Image: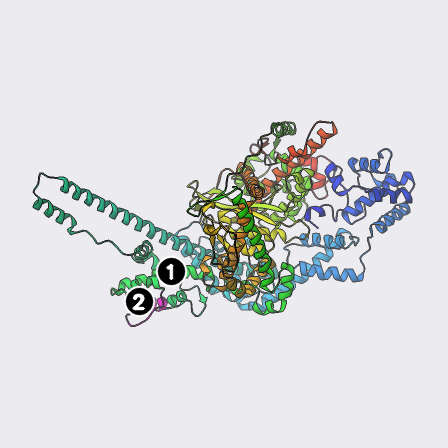
Amino acid sequence: MASFEYRYVGAESLPARLSEFDVQQYFRLSKADVEAISARFRADRRAGVAVMLLFLRASGRPLDRVSTLPRALLHHVAEAIGGRAPTIASLRSIYQRRPTHYEHQLWAKEYLGLKDVDKFNSDLLVTYLNAQANEVTSVDELVTSACRWLYERKLLIPSDRQVRDLARKCYANVEAAILTTVQETVPANLLARCREVVFSPRKDGSSTTLEWLRTPPKRHSPGTFTETLEKISFLKGLGAHEWTFNSIPLEKQRGYAQNIQARRPVMTRRLTDSSQAIELVFFLRINLLELTDGVMYQSARRVSDLVRHAYEKTQAKQARSSVEYRERLLSIKALVNDTSQPAERRLAAIGEIVTNLNPLSSTSHAASVRETLTDDPHRIRALLSSLQDLDFKGHANDNSLKLLTSLKEIYAGKLTELPQDRAFPVDKPWRDLVDDPDRKRALQALEACAMVGLRKSLRRGSVWIDHSFSYRERDQMLIPPKEWGQDRERHLSILGLSADPEAFLQPLLKHIEAGLNAVSEARQQGKLTIDAQGMLHVPALEALPEEIDPKRTRDLMFKQIGSVQFPDLMLEMDAHTNFSEILLARRATDERELVALYAALIAHGTEIDAKSVAAMTPQLDPDQVSVAMRVLEASGRLRRANESVVEFQGKHAIAELWGSGKTASSDMMSLDASRHLWNARVDPRRRTHAAGMYTHVLDQHGIVYDQPIVLSERQAGPAIEGVVRYNDSTERVRLSLLAVDTHGYTNPAMAISKLLGFDLCPRLKDLSERKLFLPRSLEAPEGLDQVLVRDVSLKAITKGWDELLRLAASIRSGRVSANVALQRFGSAAQGDPVHKAADQLGRLLRTLFLCDYFSNPEFRREIHTILNRGESVHQLQRAVYFGKVAPERGRRRDEMIAISGSHTLLTNLVLAWNTHHMQETADRWRRTGQKLEDAWLARMGPAHFANVNFRGTFRFGVSRYAEMLISGATDKPAKRA
């Protein structure tokens, strides 16, 4: 069941107010309910029984006699069973006798098929909670999981105290087991040393070691790189690289590490020995893995900078040579045309001009770049020297690893020239430079070759580091070969695929054949043309007829909806979705905590910082906002909150007019950032430094997945990752089509996405130049030869099929993210059987897609519509976050994820609020007889923000919704914050 459906599960009472939407979603009597109640009870008892039945169905717990009954619920009950709405405050008004109340309660329980928790189910619940306690990071989350488990199995949920006591016990059992694992892995004397060293001040006296380790990298600079390497060396000195905790889920380890990151060091020091040991060990371990990823990322960027610098220098050198040649040619031309001088003198002058002319180079531009790179030895040597202690491992035949070993020996011997009597395994393009008679320059060439080769080997996975998240050995990231051999059938059943590649390829080839026939038919009908150069031309789509009614209706609708202050919008949507309860893993304890959470969302999700938000929110100080911001970094909570809001939006009838929920688009939006932010890049469009945020937008407009990315990286991995994680849930409609632009597509990505159960549909750049790739054995209609390329190897697909399935199953099971998988098996892995199989299969799938795209204008229009819908949501995102990411923010992975998730949540809140009020307005118009067609509503959208005031003083009127949002709140008005 989706999280939004669980909204009232485990509730012990009803709020004083219920919206009409909540009544229709959670407390609606069916015809069968009314008939059963009418057949069993007399008229004066039916209202009370109906209320008990509805609450028991929505919450899984019986309603107390003294609980307040919302007026909207009473009106609905009266309308359903007939008669006037009862004017009662609670069930006590109806049930003067407790036995009657319990008798009716028992009937409702039997009617719903609910049972009490017996010994057997209690044991099952304990087993489930023990497993869940290994995943969640708080007892509150475990209580929520227990209530949902009982609800799904139609078991009556015990009191909150009983459930909470059981959750605490299971959580404590798991923590005891984790402590045992930690003590077995880290010897007592080493653990004592870790405590002593971590809490002691550093040599410079500026801070404690723990504070130093918590400090994220500041900027992309040699100083930051050196400091990161120093931290890695320190953690390895404690032995953190040797600790393995395979039995403990990674997210659980991250949760413990985040606890230390979120609190002040002095508070960590006050923890009990057992809690401190667990959190400290996982903080050190996770910190080492993240720092290693960071240093690899920074080194790759430094390599890119050096290569780019060499490229630019080569271009400038070639440009100067061109200018020089042109000037000399003009001088020669002037001498030729100068008839005032004798021929002998002019020839002598021409000879002087060409005397010092350098001969034309026979080398390619790439070779010139390699030469230029060789002439930059100091920075290359500094980079390679700093990486010597990182314990690289790799395949025995990897040349870059052999070169690193050789260079380590050369540096140890303090040699300045490359030994003449040794052979070095360098790639062919570098051979001439390494064989240079000038052995000093040869050493420089070897270093440049090793640097470039190491970057490529790390990307394709032939070189790895064990103490890393993203650069581990391939078999550590994928399902292990032994496990794959045992569980292959189970994984293939989940994927819906066969171990026989022919079962996949033969239907695909038949579909391609049909697609080629459709393209040929479209060509014959003049719907597309192929010119003499083999360029394929498709006419532009005809614009839909412009209708005035939908535009006027939209303007009138939003005029009636009116403007709204952002705090009021957030509160209203929280009352509908309880996203604050998801973020805190419980209801807020008081109004101040709730307002601090809202302020933290604004501080993370907009360009306003904590200090400014506190200044704009009365009775709130920056420290409260900062603490709440750390709460938002808890793993998974922002994503679950976003899912709840998107599910709420999708429950409206109007959303079904916008889309089926089966298709989506994905694209990156860049947030302006300081040039000093270490993971910022220059946006090629706007020429400013920025950080990337990649979002998946449903055809119903909601953002269903978000993730921070680096601008310069390919987006195919993030595109696939978002769909896979969204489709993990079995309770929602699965995405079957994802529209992307050219940056979100590669041939291997199209293959992986298809194996994972959805189609990747790119809007390709330079469409006229695109070719259709086919195997030689497949026949094609006449007239298409100019756009066909017959180089697809079915044999390569068959050979790499099993490993390709293993890769897809590893992504599906969550062992490796699609981002990392696509990097390891992308262009850097050329020659690898898995890459070759994915590339060849992707070519076939791209051909099938292009056949549909070329021959079917409606399919082409659908792709463009989905992508344009995503662009409209991006405009709203920019209205929410229109400033710049401050240089002190976004340095840590968790913080960047929180910025992305908070911004997405704020955007989804606006979309959901607009959708809800558009639905209310449409329903009201139809009740009054005003003309309103579904076709008009289908052409509107909720990405409207002119009516929302995102800035100003933030006044949160919590009192109106206190009963629904604050634990233990009454309907008594609360002080305004």
Q: Position of residue 236 (x, y in %)?
A: 47, 64
Is residue 801 visible to us here?
Answer: yes
- Three-letter residue code for mark 2: Lys
Q: Which residues are magenta?
A: 406-426
Which residue is painted at 25% across and 64% down in the image? Answer: 438
Q: Tell me the quarter of the image containing the C terminus.
A: top right
Q: Position of residue 108 (x, y in %)?
A: 85, 48
- Three-letter residue code for mark 1: Met
Magenta stretch holds residue 411: yes
Is residue 666 visible to us here?
Answer: no
Magenta stretch holds residue 99: no
Mark 2 nearby-residue class (10 Å; few <14, some 14–19, many ≥20): few
Q: Is residue 714 above or below residue 837?
A: above
Which residue is painted at 19% across and 51% down in the image? Answer: 357
Q: Mark number for residue 414? A: 2
- Secondary structure state at the residue bearing disc 2: loop
- Secondary structure state at the residue bearing disc 1: helix
